[in-house]
Amino acid sequence: MPNGKRPVWGVITPTAPPAVLAGQAQMYEQAGLEGVFAPQVYGPPFVPLAAAAAVTTRVKLASGIALAFARSPFETAMAAIDLDRISGGRFTLGLGCSIRTWSEGFFGMPYGKPLEHLREVVETDPADHR
């Protein structure tokens, strides 16, 4: 830990060119940061985190946050499993429900009852869909 007290995490820029994204992840690892977050802004956080996993060996990786309404619970679970496998167990899934205007306007998903939908995402077992 760089400050010797609390773990410090960095944020990678999901929309950056591949070389910049890889450079950010490597820089954070070399600086001794605990991990890197990729926010869901204009796309899923999983692809940028997979790119970071490919060029690092130690830093933890986390979605900060993956929007529960933007994809099916099954797809979210499978992406998390794949990323955890690719990273050698360094991935943590961060989920959230966003706000009504983003869910409905940007992603075209009904907002409905966010807590119920988030609960469904968390409780989904990918083995049930095989």
Image: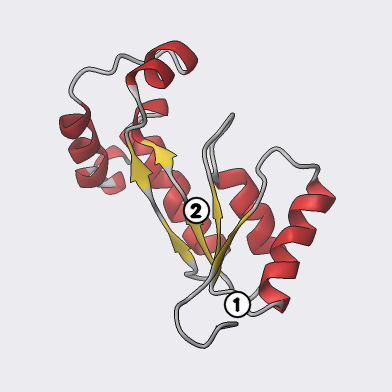
Residue 125 image point, x, y percent: 25, 47
Q: Type of residue at label 1?
A: Arg
- Identify which residue is drawn at 40% across, 53% down: 93
Tell which of 90 and 111 is nearer to you. 111
The image's colour scheme reads: secondary structure
- Identify which residue is drawn at 70% across, 37% down: 15
Q: Which residue is mark 2?
A: 82
Judge left or right: residue 62 versus residue 99: right
- Identify which residue is drawn at 56% across, 83% down: 3
Question: Is 20 located above or below residue 110 in the figure?
Answer: below
Judge left or right: residue 92 versus residue 110: right
Question: Is 57 located above or below residue 41 in the figure?
Answer: below
Judge left or right: residue 21 versus residue 117: right
* Quadrant of the rendering where the N terminus is positioned: bottom right
Q: Which residue is mark 1?
A: 58
Foreground label between 2 and 1: 1
* Quadrant of the rendering where the C terminus is positioned: top left
Tell me which corner region of the image, top left, top right, bottom left or bottom right, holds residue 71: top left
How many marks do you count on the picture? 2
Helix, strand or loop at label 1? It is: loop
Question: Is 87 located above or below residue 128 in the figure?
Answer: below
Q: Type of residue at label 2?
A: Asp
Tell me which corner region of the image, top left, top right, bottom left or bottom right, holds residue 9: bottom right
- Identify which residue is drawn at 81% across, 42% down: 17
Which comes sooner in the sequence, label 2 or label 1? 1
